[in-house]
Image (cartoon, rainbow, N blue to C red):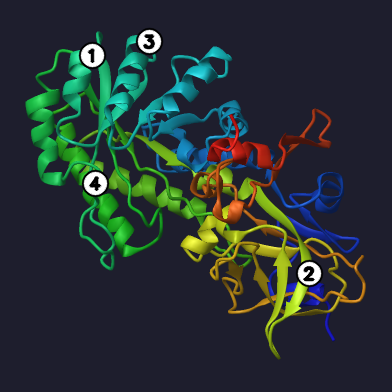
Amino acid sequence: MKKYIDLIEQTFEFPQEEFRVEKNELLFNEVPLMPIIEKYGTPLKLTYLPKIGENIKYARRIFNNAIKKHNYSGSYTYCYCTKSSHFSFVLEEALKHGAHIETSSSYDIPIIRKLHEAGKIDKDLFIVCNGFKRPLYREYISELLNDGFKNTIPVLDNLNELSHYEEHVKKSYKVGIRIAADEEPNFEFYTSRLGIRYSDVNTLYREQIKPSKKAKLKLLHFFINTGIRDTAYYWSELSRFIFKYCELKKECPELDTIDIGGGFPIKTSMQFEFDYKYMAEQIVENVKWICGKNNVPVPNIFTEFGSFTVGESGAALYSIMDQKLQNDKELWYMIDGSFITHLPDVWGLSQKYIMLAVNKWDDIYHKVNLGGLTCDSQDYYNSESHSSEVFLPMLDPKNKKDKLYIGFFHTGAYQESLGGYGGIQHCLIPAPQHVLVDKDKNGEFTTRLFAAEQNSDGMLQLLGYSG
């Protein structure tokens, strides 16, 4: 019978950039995982901080290379989309590598204030404020502008939003307009609920922004839910957006920037293929061609990558607590955590992540189902992106010391935001401990505990059982 490592090597090109095996154990970005498990235990969330900087530098490099290749006269600016992960260690790492910020909520603004107080950002940072804004969000944005955060750009999402800034902002300021793109043809509705419809964009500029003595239109914003993909739909919507930019630029000389949003995909399968360099070059080339056709200067380009920034830095590690044979052919490996609470995209979106054994790579494998701890029938994982089955090394049911550890990788975006962090979750499953992995000045790996596993005292407090 074949070993688990034989299965992986025959199924995928292996080892890969992020994954290799040494002495029967998995390394993630060259980080040995078993010593971390032995030190901290499971379940645990892990963030490999250097990956954040690597992806920021990579995106900046391919866009700047594309700009140089096509003799494009505009500049490129990388923004981090905070809603992907608001943790301080993520924001600080992104800022350390020159990222600017895109926000979507009123409570993003106090985070910006804290970062400024700590000396992590200055008032020249671009802060692109997206979203349909409640009164508090608009108030916080106005305060930033009044306090000298001159590159704060509220992106107008409805026709009534500008009036608040006109009333409350005391100095000149920049605004953007988000354009409502058409959704993918198989979507449940035709046009995005977010942004200003194409037919209203020029009217909004002429009747509200142009007459203003303070507001200047700086930016047009574009985003589609499918993200940046090499499809006819993406190129059609992007081209339509650039033509609108050209049309508006002819009557608005201050307009000089497009924000093409986020949407660079991340690797959620060992068979993942995506030509980032090609897409960056095609975007730059298409923008230049359309602007040339319309005889207008090319715009500066902003992106707002969230998952691309932080997703591949994350992992969730579990131990297999026990195995249960529920009938003649369905063998369950029970993890010491929950998919619903720890990795909600697995449950809510049927998302598949890279899942690999951490140890026992020289052992024989077999087909299993993975079960979570909640009593919900949907708390399971039994298929991969490349297969309708899951295979893992065998356990000896008679040997209680025979331990298997597994990992789900590239889980760093959205999971805590969607599942809730440190709150009350299904069946009172606690939030797992969170470990940060970094490199010191000598290139040696370091680990530190960011947060311990959630305890019962905190839950009782939230539920009203403690004073």
Q: Give residue 241's mark.
A: 4
**In this orientation, which residue lies closer to the viewer: 136 or 429?**
429
Q: Is residue 460 left or right of residue 147?
A: right
Alpha carbons under labels 1 and 4: distance apart: 31 Å
Viewer-nearest of discs 2 and 1: 2
Q: Mark 1 points at which residue?
A: 168
Earlier-in-chain disc, 4 versus 3: 3
Earlier-in-chain disc, 2 versus 1: 1
Marks 3/1 in contact by CB < 8 Å: the verdict is no
**In this orientation, which residue lies closer to the viewer: 160 or 385?**
160
Kind of residue at badge 4: Phe
Alpha carbons under labels 3 and 1: distance apart: 14 Å
What is the number of callouts on the image?
Answer: 4
Kind of residue at badge 3: Gly
Earlier-in-chain disc, 1 versus 4: 1
Earlier-in-chain disc, 2 versus 3: 3
Q: Mark 3 points at which residue?
A: 148
